Image (spheres, grey):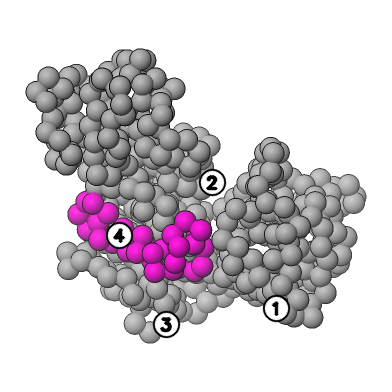
């Protein structure tokens, strides 16, 4: 492929010289350490470094040209293509380089504040149960045509995303389900893709350190339903019980399915039975009624299952196939994940890290009719500070005992973060404790627990690390809780007290 073919239809600040247009291109890279002969190096500012500073290094390693939003620096002599939006340009180049794999697959993009991961897991399990070769990309893990790899970003950069899609396509895949974060939409990581189905779960306060306001946060989500540089999705599956979901606009060419528990939903849940066993309910959909059973717990998962059910219908599954596939999804790591060592109380680890998610997760615990709900949580450092007292208030209002601790403090003082959260905790008279050391905090809450209680360890979920000011350490809430419960002498998961 020539450079001219690679950048076709991408606006440039200056015409492409004929000598540059004929250059042979073999790849695209955004990391100068991987630059080699024949690649186009995309140079743009990242979270930790500015790629423009490494353009010369990339050229010395064999890159044929540089694409950047900035003009060429003084003294740079190689081909330099200045574009309006670097990441959007890279997405379009990578799509062309890998032969538009999104056009060969039914792409299911899931966006929203909470529920993306669970909806993605349920959707992918459903499609695999129906015998399809699939891909799934999200916060916890990437599953690519039967192969698993560790997740790097919720939504990878366009180059990595196209590689993964290409692998699924080449393996004979039919579907590719992935979480589409607001960061990915705002930065242009999914620019120009052809989405078959777009799902909106909900919108609550989060990531305002990046977006600045709820309106900008919503605008990023809206862009997926506008097409994000590509055609509008064929199907839009939208939570109509969410205030922001009702504000979403869809194209006239998009088939809209609204889901929820209230009147007006196209996919409506009725006869809900929620308990320790999981969920049972009927979904009323255009053309019929289907019974759903799931091992997932809590009302919030009714919404996630409805969204996944709608995705199944959109890609041609029958209601019966969708229901059978949803029943096959046993659990989602770090999402109301039970820690069972035979103890006489329930211990759950959950990723809830916003006030809304915390309220929803505690509501799931309350629905199990426990004696008490004991909640441990922390707030992330270098993130939206205003949500900390809101999380504290949510935990204290809905729990019987609260332990406030560290999450990922990053560069901030953990005690300062805790103090912010305590402002909200102290709005209630709920008994609480403070312990900055997360492992000691888990011990405090387990020591407090008695028969019939639910212990909720919130905030980190599936994460296996903790980000401190000067280092990242290995830390898994699930393993810490298991180790402590074993040390207390409980008989293990196969033996019930």
Please identify the quadrant where the N terminus is shown.
top left
Q: Nearer the viewer, mark 2 or mark 1?
A: 1
Marks 4 and 2 in Cβ contact (< 8 Å): no
- Give the numbered dot on residue 54: none
Image location of residue 463, percent across then percent down: 63, 46
- Give the numbered dot on residue 140: 2
Q: Nearer the viewer, mark 3 or mark 4?
A: 4
Indicate the quadrant where residue 14 lies: top left
Give the mark nearest the N terminus, 1 or 4.
4
Residue bearing the label numbered 4: 223
Residue bearing the label numbered 3: 262
The range drawn in magenta is 203-232
Secondary structure of the residue carrying tag 1 is: helix
| Numbered marks: total | 4
For the residue carrying disc 4, how many other residues have a C-alpha within 10 Å: few (<14), some (14-19), or many (20+)?
some
Q: Is residue 214 magenta?
A: yes
Q: CA distance from mark 3 to mark 1?
A: 26 Å
Give the mark nearest the N terminus, 3 or 1.
3
Identify whether 93 is placed above or below 435: above
Marks 2 and 1 in Cβ contact (< 8 Å): no
Image location of residue 25, percent across then percent down: 23, 22
Give the mark nearest the N terminus, 2 or 3.
2
Name the residue rendered at 25%, 68% in the picture: 250
Indicate the quadrant where residue 421 lies: bottom right
Secondary structure of the residue carrying tag 3 is: loop
Residue bearing the label numbered 1: 397
Identify whether 489 is placed above or below 276: above
For the residue carrying disc 2, how many other residues have a C-alpha within 10 Å: few (<14), some (14-19), or many (20+)?
many
Secondary structure of the residue carrying tag 2 is: loop
Q: CA distance from mark 2 to mark 3?
A: 31 Å
């Amino acid at each position: 492929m020539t450079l001219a073919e690679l950048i076709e239809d991408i606006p440039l600040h200056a015409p492409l010289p004929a000598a540059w247009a004929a250059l042979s291109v073999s790849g695209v890279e955004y990391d100068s350490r991987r630059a080699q002969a024949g690649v186009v190096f995309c140079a743009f500012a990242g979270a930790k470094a500015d790629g423009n500073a490494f353009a010369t290094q990339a050229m010395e390693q064999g890159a044929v040209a540089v694409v950047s939003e900035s003009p060429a620096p003084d003294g740079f002599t190689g081909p330099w293509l200045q574009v309006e939006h670097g990441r959007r340009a890279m997405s379009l180049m990578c799509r062309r380089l890998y032969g538009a794999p999104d056009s060969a697959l039914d792409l299911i993009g899931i966006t929203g504040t909470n529920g993306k991961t669970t909806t993605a897991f349920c959707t992918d399990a459903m499609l695999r149960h129906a015998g399809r070769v699939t891909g799934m990309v999200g916060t916890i893990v990437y599953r690519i045509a039967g192969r698993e790899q560790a997740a790097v970003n919720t939504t990878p950069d366009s180059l990595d995303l196209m590689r993964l899609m290409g692998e699924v396509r080449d393996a004979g895949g039919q579907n590719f389900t992935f979480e589409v974060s607001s960061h990915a939409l705002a930065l242009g990581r999914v620019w120009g893709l052809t989405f078959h189905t777009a799902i909106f779960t909900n919108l609550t306060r989060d990531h305002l350190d990046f977006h600045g306001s709820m309106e900008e946060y919503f605008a990023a989500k809206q862009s997926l339903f506008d097409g994000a540089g590509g055609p509008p999705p064929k199907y839009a599956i939208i939570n109509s019980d969410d205030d922001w979901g009702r504000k979403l606009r869809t194209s006239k060419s998009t088939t809209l399915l609204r889901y929820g528990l209230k009147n007006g939903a196209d996919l409506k849940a009725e006869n809900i039975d929620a308990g320790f066993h999981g969920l049972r309910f009927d979904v009323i959909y255009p053309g019929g009624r289907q019974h759903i059973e799931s091992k997932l717990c809590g009302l919030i998962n009714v919404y996630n299952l409805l969204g996944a059910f709608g995705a199944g219908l959109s890609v041609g599954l029958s209601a019966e196939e969708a229901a059978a596939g949803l029943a096959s999804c046993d659990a989602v790591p770090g999402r109301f994940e039970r820690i069972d060592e035979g103890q006489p109380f329930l211990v759950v680890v959950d990723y809830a890290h916003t006030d809304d998610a915390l309220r929803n997760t505690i509501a799931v615990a309350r629905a199990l009719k426990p004696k008490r709900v004991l909640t441990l949580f922390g707030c992330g450092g270098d993130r939206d500070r205003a949500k900390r007292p809101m999380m504290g208030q949510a935990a204290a209002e809905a729990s019987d005992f609260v332990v406030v601790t560290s999450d990922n403090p990053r560069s901030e003082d953990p005690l300062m973060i805790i103090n912010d959260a305590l402002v909200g905790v102290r709005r209630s008279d709920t008994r609480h404790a403070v312990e900055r050391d997360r492992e000691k905090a888990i011990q405090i809450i387990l020591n407090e627990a008695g028969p019939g209680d639910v212990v909720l360890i919130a905030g980190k979920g599936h994460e296996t690390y903790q980000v401190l000011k000067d280092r990242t350490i290995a830390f898994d809430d699930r393993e810490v809780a298991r180790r402590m419960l074993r040390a207390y002498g409980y008989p293990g998961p196969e033996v019930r007290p």
